[in-house]
Image (spheres, grey):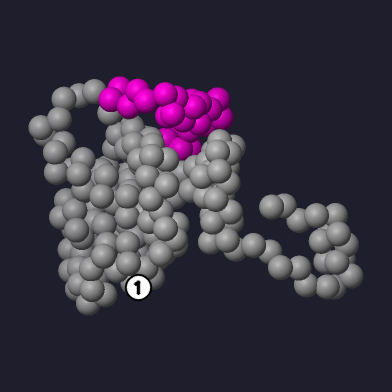
């Protein structure tokens, strides 16, 4: 929870205060959510939605589609939360679901009808989730900056295989360790390293023409 008045007093006196880390905070929110606290699940979504959205947008190269997939992810998280045993960190479990949803969408994109997958979710227990995603504050898509460089990079990333796109998104954009990525993808760390090496080489080759063009413009 938030630091108490006593905590602030201790800090003022130079007494160290134990601040809960992200993992502890997630565990507390998961426990509260499982106990029926809907506010806790909303906090869980708000804590991770921007990072989740950023990863999805990188994977599918479409902010609007990414917003749709992000909603699918959190609905799936809500429905599966009772199966989360805490054997891995919540963030690892969440990103595993996120990546799998992205890969599934990429795989079946051409065969799916153009309709929101949320139309398929009508169970009463999920009704309150719509309020989370219809919040009047700016959505993740609204705050996702679309600069020229990001446009170029996303376009180049879209040319990579889904496997290479995944490791770049998790390592170079999200800053996750190779060990964490291996845990998320449930593959050997050697596989992560080789995919990352190949992906970065491919990116370097594809971005070189843009880099050279920018250099000429600055000259």
Relative horizontal placement of residue 81, taking residue 183 as reference (left or right): right
Residue sitting at the far left: 111
Q: Quadrant of the C terminus?
A: bottom left
- Residue pictured at 25% horizontal, 50% vertical: 100
Residue 216 seen in render = no
Up/down of 68 relative to 208, above or below: above
Residue in the foreground of this view, choosing between 209 and 106: 106
Count of numbered circles on the image: 1
Q: Is residue 17 visible?
A: yes
> 206 or 162, which is in the foreground?
162
Q: In the rendered view, does 170 fall on the left or right side of 91?
A: left
User: Tag 1's secondary structure?
Assistant: helix
- Residue under numbered circle 1: 179
Instruction: Locate residue 172: give its quadrant.
Output: bottom left
Q: Residue at x 34, y 36 (%)?
A: 72
- Which stretch did the figure color magenta? 119-146
Q: Residue at x 20, y 60 (%)?
A: 164
From the viewer's perspective, is 57 left or right of 103?
right
Give how far across and how far down residue 13 sits, in percent. Answer: 89, 70
Whether 205 is among the magenta residues is no
Q: Is residue 206 above or below residue 201?
A: above
Residue toward you, 184 or 65:
184
Q: Position of residue 47 (x, y in %)?
A: 53, 47
Mark 1 neighbour class, 10 Å CA radius: few under 14, some 14 to 19, many 20 or more: some
Residue 123 lies within the magenta run:
yes
**Snapshot quadrant of residue 175:** bottom left
**Is residue 27 shown left or right of residue 112?**
right
């Amino acid at each position: 929870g938030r630091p108490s008045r006593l905590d602030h007093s201790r800090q003022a006196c130079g007494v160290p205060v134990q601040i809960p880390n992200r993992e502890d905070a997630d565990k507390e929110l998961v426990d509260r959510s499982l106990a029926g606290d809907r506010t806790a699940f909303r906090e869980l979504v708000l804590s991770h939605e921007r990072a989740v959205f950023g990863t999805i947008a990188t994977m599918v190269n479409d902010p609007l589609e990414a917003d749709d997939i992000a909603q699918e992810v959190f609905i799936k998280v809500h429905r599966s939360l009772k199966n989360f045993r805490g054997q891995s960190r919540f963030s690892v479990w969440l990103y595993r679901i996120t990546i799998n949803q992205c890969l599934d969408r990429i795989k079946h994109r051409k065969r799916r009808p153009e309709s929101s997958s949320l139309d398929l979710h009508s169970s009463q227990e999920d009704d309150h989730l719509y309020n989370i995603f219809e919040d009047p504050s700016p959505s993740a898509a609204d705050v996702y900056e679309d600069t020229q460089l990001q446009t170029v990079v996303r376009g180049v990333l879209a040319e990579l295989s889904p496997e290479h796109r995944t490791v770049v998104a998790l390592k170079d954009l999200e800053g996750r360790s190779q060990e964490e990525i291996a845990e998320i993808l449930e593959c050997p760390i050697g596989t992560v390293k080789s995919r990352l090496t190949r992906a970065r080489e491919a990116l370097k080759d594809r971005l070189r023409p843009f880099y050279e063009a920018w250099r000429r413009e600055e000259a």
